[in-house]
Amino acid sequence: MLSNARRIVNELLAAGTTKTTIGRDIGYSRAAVSRWLSEPDYNGASIEAAVVARYSRAACPVLKAEITIAQCSAYALAACPTSNARDARHWKTCQTCPHKPDPEKGVSK
């Protein structure tokens, strides 16, 4: 069974994105991405985490749109905004959202 990260990368490759581009986007070399894809026993947990952080999306119930995990983290893990009521309501909703990232990992639960 493919991990979520491998599924994402396979979809990107099928759509024409190169391994070089994926590597650059996640901060790894083309060779590291290629090895992670071709060797099932390769321990690429950090590559998987980087792929998920860069390419995964979550449905934001407040914005009514899909946002990246990095954007989700920026909203949910920030301090509660005190100068803007709309931003405070958004932050409060984030605290109970099923997509809220784990503060220790920075990715969705």
Image (cartoon, helix red, strand yellow):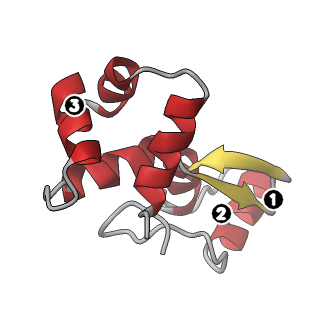
* Residue at 32% over, 54% down: 49
Q: Secondary structure at mark 3?
A: loop
For this rendering, which residue is in front, 48 or 90?
Answer: 48
Q: Earlier in the sequence, mark 1 or mark 3?
A: 3
Q: Closer to the camera: disc 2 or disc 3?
A: 3
Which residue position holds label 1?
62
Q: Secondary structure at mark 1?
A: loop
Q: Earlier in the sequence, mark 2 or mark 1?
A: 1
Q: Is residue 76 left or right of residue 3?
A: right
Mark 2, residues whose alpha carbon is within 10 Å: few (<14), some, or many (≥20)? many
Which residue position holds label 3?
28
* Residue at 30% over, 27% down: 23
Q: Earlier in the sequence, mark 2 or mark 3?
A: 3
- Residue 81: image x %, image y %? 61, 55
Mark 1, residues whose alpha carbon is within 10 Å: few (<14), some, or many (≥20)? few
- Residue 107: image x %, image y %? 43, 62
Q: Is residue 19 above or below residue 49?
A: above
Q: Closer to the camera: disc 2 or disc 1?
A: 1
Disc ID at residue 91? 2
Q: Is residue 1 left or right of residue 96?
A: left
Amino acid type, callout 2: Trp
Amino acid type, callout 1: Val
Tags 2 and 1 in contact by the CB under 8 Å rule? no
- Residue 19: image x %, image y %? 35, 25
* Residue at 25% over, 44% down: 38
Q: Closer to the camera: disc 1 or disc 3?
A: 3
Instruction: Measure the C-alpha gap from mark 1 to mark 3.
Output: 33 Å
